Image: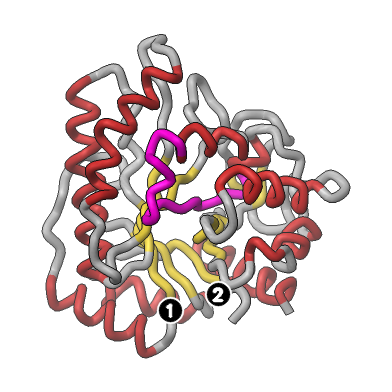
Amino acid sequence: MRNPIGGHVPVAGGLARTGLPYARELGAEAVQIFVANPRGWATPAGDPAQDEQFRKECAEESVAAYVHAPYLINFGSHTAATVERSVDSLRHSLRRARQTGALGVVVHTGSATGGRPRAEALAQVRTHLLPLLDELTHDDDPFLLLESTAGQGSSLCSRTWDFGPYFDALDSHPKLGVCLDTCHVFAAGHDLAGPGGMKQTLDLLVGTVGEGRLKLIHANDSKEAAGAHKDRHENIGAGHIGEEPFRELLSHPATEGVPLVIETPGGKEGHRADVRRLKALRN
């Protein structure tokens, strides 16, 4: 399939018990899950029976699964406790991804806090993140997928070319990939809605990180205009990006085989409509 299309699914009550029925109702061909509270530092063990069931059913139904790491993770923080917790939290997400059969773990690229220079923050990213990547030695280990932000504050990575220094800091590790969030990159200043804007942005990304590094797309429209630096997701076609750029995305060579996951508002009905809309654009 050129692009499996799906969504982020709730898993309270069990990965397989709650997440997969929700995915089926959406008609999802790909799913993204949290394996911990996204706004906390807890590292819960998970339920081995649910993990096994989730793995088995995803394999049987050819559903690509991904884990989203908690939002608090920031390897560029000037606070030692935050960096330490970030290491534990991301290691937990990577381990849980392996246990659930997920193909990748999405992590936000963070920011240089405390007024420190970007170079200093990136050196710290290298010190603490590279060892985690080096632990990914098995063929079935997940990829670590860097997700850029909308460009708020002292963000380390928001424009496509910011991935360059980040990849350099991590020696372009073979287990490193990109999760491109269309709302974030639009908010950061790439006008996907302008003539050829989506193609230009994807070309820039490939030019920066190389071919084959784009592993996942968060397909979200934007409530705010391009360059607003505000991370506010909208349903596909209902925001400032509009429908046409997503059609452009779905035919670009860089997105061949890359799953699209929605993180849009509207609950189950809104999600089902967005999955249907993207499938129509794909077809």
Q: Residue at x 56, y 47 (%)?
A: 209
Number of other residues with Cα within 10 Å of mark 1, as a class: few under 14, some 14 to 19, many 20 or more: many
Q: Residue at x 59, y 57 (%)?
A: 211
Q: Which residue is mark 2?
A: 4
Q: Residue 149: horizontal and vertical position, in percent?
A: 52, 36
Q: Residue 144: horizontal and vertical position, in percent?
A: 37, 52
Q: Residue 186: horizontal and vertical position, in percent?
A: 67, 40
181 or 1, which is in the foreground? Answer: 1
Kindly indicate the quadrant of the structure image that contains residue 259.
bottom right
Could one spot residue 22 in this view of the protein? yes
Does 17 sit above or below residue 69?
below
* Callout 2–callout 1 Cβ contact below 8 Å: yes
Left or right? Give the position of 208 relative to 23: right
Q: Which residues are magenta?
A: 168-183
Mark 2 element type:
loop
Left or right? Give the position of 242 relative to 125: right
- Identify the mark at residue 63; answer none if there is no mark: 1
Q: Residue at x 74, y 68 (%)?
A: 251
Distance of label 2 from label 1 (alpha carbons): 8 Å
Does 104 sit above or below residue 110?
below
The amino acid pointed to by label 2 is Pro
Mark 2 or 1, nearer chain start:
2
Q: Is 177 a magenta residue? A: yes
Furthest residue in direction right, as rendered: 195
The amino acid pointed to by label 1 is Val
Q: Is 81 a magenta residue? A: no
Does 107 sit above or below residue 17?
above
Furthest residue in direction top, as rendered: 115
Kindly indicate the quadrant of the structure image that contains residue 81.
top left
- Identify the mark at residue 74; answer none if there is no mark: none
